[in-house]
């Protein structure tokens, strides 16, 4: 897991090097990209409303970790 939320919440997504136009990537990589992007968005929102999004961010972290294995 890359803990990039303090510097760039989308670093994990960017490092996957998957863009929406790449339809021929493996399904698992596409799924991971969606969750990484969702995680980045949730971390940005959490900065404004910490209590509301802490559980969501934690859940997305766990899901991304599982998909990476």
Image: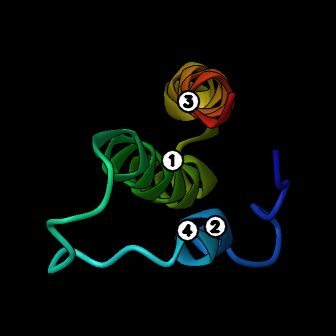
- Disc 1 is placed on an element classified as helix
- Gap in angstroms between the C-alphas marked 4 and 3: 12 Å
- Disc 2 is placed on an element classified as loop
- Gap in angstroms between the C-alphas marked 2 and 1: 8 Å
Above or below 14: residue 47: above
Tags 4 and 3 touching, CB below 8 Å: no
Q: How is the image coloured?
A: rainbow
Tags 2 and 3 touching, CB below 8 Å: no
Q: Residues within 10 Å of mark 1 (few under 14, many from 20)?
A: many
Residue that carries the numbered disc 2 in the rendered image? 9
**Which residue is more in the foreground, 21 or 52?**
21
Above or below 10: residue 45: above
Tell me the residue at 50%/26% (across/down). Answer: 56
Tell me the residue at 85%/54% (across/down). Answer: 3
Q: Name the spot of residue 10 as percent of width and height, x first.
A: 57, 71
- Gap in angstroms between the C-alphas marked 2 and 3: 18 Å
Q: Residues within 10 Å of mark 3 (few under 14, many from 20)?
A: few
Residue that carries the numbered disc 4 in the rendered image? 16
Horizontal side of residue 23 vs 46, given as left or right: left
Q: Nearer the viewer, mark 1 or mark 4?
A: 4
- Gap in angstroms between the C-alphas marked 1 and 4: 14 Å
Tags 2 and 1 touching, CB below 8 Å: yes
Q: Name the spot of residue 57 as percent of width and height, x first.
A: 58, 33
State the quadrant of the C terminus: top right
Residue that carries the numbered disc 3 in the rendered image? 67
Residue that carries the numbered disc 1 in the rendered image? 39
Horizontal side of residue 53 vs 58, given as left or right: left
- Disc 4 is placed on an element classified as helix
């Amino acid at each position: 897991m890359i803990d990039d939320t303090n510097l760039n919440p989308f670093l994990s997504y960017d490092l996957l090097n998957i863009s929406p136009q790449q339809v021929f990537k493996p399904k698992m990589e596409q799924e991971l990209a969606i969750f990484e992007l969702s995680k980045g968005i949730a971390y940005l929102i959490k900065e404004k409303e910490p209590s509301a999004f802490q559980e969501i961010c934690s859940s997305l972290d766990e899901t991304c970790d599982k998909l990476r294995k």
